[in-house]
Image (cartoon, rainbow, N blue to C red):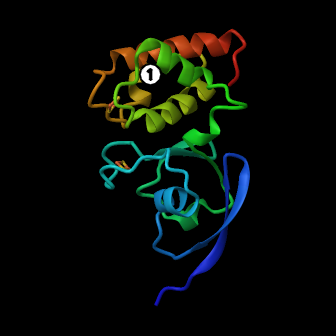
Amino acid sequence: MMAKEIAAFVVNGQKYDVIIEPHMLLVDVLRDSLGLTGTKYACGAGDCGACTVLIDGKPSLSCLTLAITARDKSILTIEGLAQGGELHPIQQAFVETGAIQCGFCTPGMTLSVKALLDEEPEPTRDEIGNAIAGNLCRCTGYVKIIDAVESAAAAMRDGGRR
Ligand code: FES
Ligand code: FES
């Protein structure tokens, strides 16, 4: 039998001690152990990007990440973006630009975009396309998403929250 242990996870700036087993995936710790169901689970195979979170600022597929490898690292999920009841500028731009339809891809997409804009405040449309290449959207055709990212980037350059 696999040994259970207590591991510390830092999610959205808050530390949690979670009982885990060695085979547990990060997506299951986030959704089932911590109740952070904003992180979506779809393909479970690394193909859709719905489960994307940031680990130490880097987009990571939580369905392919063993939870134990993320212990003590800084994890950002979609629940950590809005602050004090205010949407993050990326979320605001997605809403205003019509870049959300069913919304299933949106949490993972938003976090991939956040990682991009943290590195590159003024990306080209090609750079935006590359940054979200691993995030499948069945609804929008991507054009409005890329429009939203340009709009968010402009808002953030104009002094919006990062
Ligand atoms: S659920 Fe992780 S990539 Fe699809
Ligand atoms: S809005 Fe439906 S999958 Fe992207």
Query: Is residue 122 visible to the viewer in this orientation of the structure?
Result: no
Considering depth in this image, is 40 or 64 the residue closer to the camera? 40
Q: Nearer the viewer, residue 127 or 61?
A: 61
At a point 48% along the width and 19% down the height, the residue shown is 95
Which image quarter: residue 125? top left
Name the quarter showing ligand 2. Answer: top left
Q: Secondary structure at mark 1?
A: helix
Please tell me in which quadrant of the rendered image residue 44 appears: bottom left
Asked if 132 appears above or below 4 in the picture, the reply is: above
Residue 104: x and y in percent read 37, 37
Relative to 152, is 134 on the left or the right?
left
Amino acid beneath label 1: Ile
Q: Which residue, as the protein is rendered here, is positioned at the far bottom?
A: 1
Q: In the displayed structure, would residue 58 be above or below residue 70? A: above
Nearer to the camera, 118 or 50: 50
Is residue 155 among what the camera can see?
Answer: yes
As drawn, which residue projects farthest toward the front? 85
- Residue placed at 39% from the left, 43% from the top? 50
Task: Judge the density around disc 1: few (<14), some (14-19), many (≥20) Cα neighbours within 10 Å.
Answer: many
Mark 1: C-beta under 8 Å from nearest atom of ligand 2: no
Give residue 144's position: percent from left, percent from top: 38, 15
Picture quarter with the C terminus: top right
User: Count of labels shown?
Assistant: 1
Identify whether 41 is placed above or below 83: below
Which residue lies under the disc numbered 1? Answer: 128
Give the image location of residue 123, x and y in percent: 51, 17
Which quarter of the picture shows residue 64?
Answer: bottom left
